[in-house]
């Protein structure tokens, strides 16, 4: 069964790396079912990352995510959540370079905060964030579970 995930190209990667990232998404057989470029407001960024509200880096993270346009994508594929996380590599680019040198973060991220891409961490978060970013349009796989 196909699964959906939410992927984000973050502001640090938009100018230099967006095209390459989109190319690789297609090369890895994801279908891009929804896509939009958007500048998050502070309120939206805070809500989007509410799971991290207590973290010491929360305000930096919100600041960073609002500083310019992001690309929001809904990716569809079998096992999309895990597949996209594998493509991104570990959150920390140093770790990514050491363990997954071909991953997007190994190649494009500059540090822990400015790490070029985001992906939902599980299926429930994926559906929640898709609804938050794109509105409540039901995806095909919300209807067909077989
Ligand atoms: P992301 O996968 O989008 O999820 C939360 C984000 O917070 C993460 O990528 C980084 O951009 C940022 N982040 C995570 N850990 C740290 C940290 N220790 N210091 C600064 N930023 C961080």
Image (cartoon, rainbow, N blue to C red):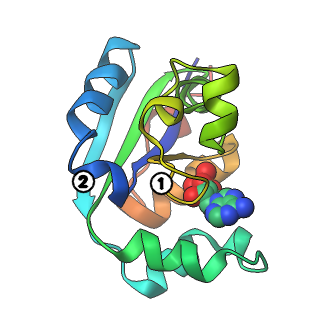
> Which of the two marks, 1 or 2, is nearer to us in this view?
2
Which of 106/41 is in front?
A: 106
Ligand 1 quadrant assignment: bottom right
Q: Which residue is mark 1?
A: 130
Q: Which residue is mark 2?
A: 36
Which of 140/22 is in front?
A: 22
Percent of width and height locating residue 84: 54, 29
Tally the numbered discs. 2
The reply to whether the C-beta atoms of the residues labelled 1 and 2 are less than 8 Å apart is no
The residue lying at 23 percent from left, 57 percent from top is 37
Percent of width and height locating residue 71: 30, 52
- Quick one: SS at disc 2? strand
Q: Taking 82 as reference, is 15 left or right?
A: left
- 139 is higher (above) or lower (below) than 57: above
Q: Quadrant of the C terminus?
A: top right
- Quick one: SS at disc 1? helix
**Which quadrant of the structure image shows residue 136?**
bottom left
Query: How many C-alpha atoms fall within 10 Å of the one at disc 2: few (<14), some, or many (≥20)?
Result: few
**Which quadrant of the structure image shows residue 55?**
bottom right
The residue lying at 47 percent from left, 44 percent from top is 109
Query: How many C-alpha atoms fall within 10 Å of the one at disc 1: few (<14), some, or many (≥20)?
Result: many
Which of 33/28 is in front?
A: 28
The residue lying at 55 percent from left, 72 percent from top is 61
Q: CA distance from mark 1 to mark 2?
A: 12 Å
Which of 44/76 is in front?
A: 44
| First reached walking from the N terminus: tag 1 or tag 2 | 2
Q: Taking 23 as reference, is 7 left or right?
A: right
Beta carbon at label 2 within 8 Å of ligand 1: no
């Amino acid at each position: 069964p196909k699964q959906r995930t939410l992927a984000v190209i973050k502001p640090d990667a938009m100018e230099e790396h967006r095209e390459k990232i989109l190319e690789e998404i297609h090369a890895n057989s994801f279908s891009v079912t929804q896509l939009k470029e958007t500048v998050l407001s502070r309120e939206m960024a805070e809500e989007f990352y509410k799971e991290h509200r207590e973290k010491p880096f929360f305000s930096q993270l919100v600041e960073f995510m609002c500083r310019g346009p992001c690309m929001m994508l809904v990716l569809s594929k079998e096992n999309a959540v895990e597949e996209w996380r594998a493509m991104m590599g570990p959150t920390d680019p140093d770790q990514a370079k050491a363990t997954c040198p071909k991953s997007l973060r190994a190649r494009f991220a500059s540090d822990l905060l400015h790490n070029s891409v985001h992906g939902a961490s599980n299926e429930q978060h994926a559906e929640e964030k898709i609804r938050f970013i794109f509105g409540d349009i039901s995806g095909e796989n919300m209807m067909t579970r077989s």
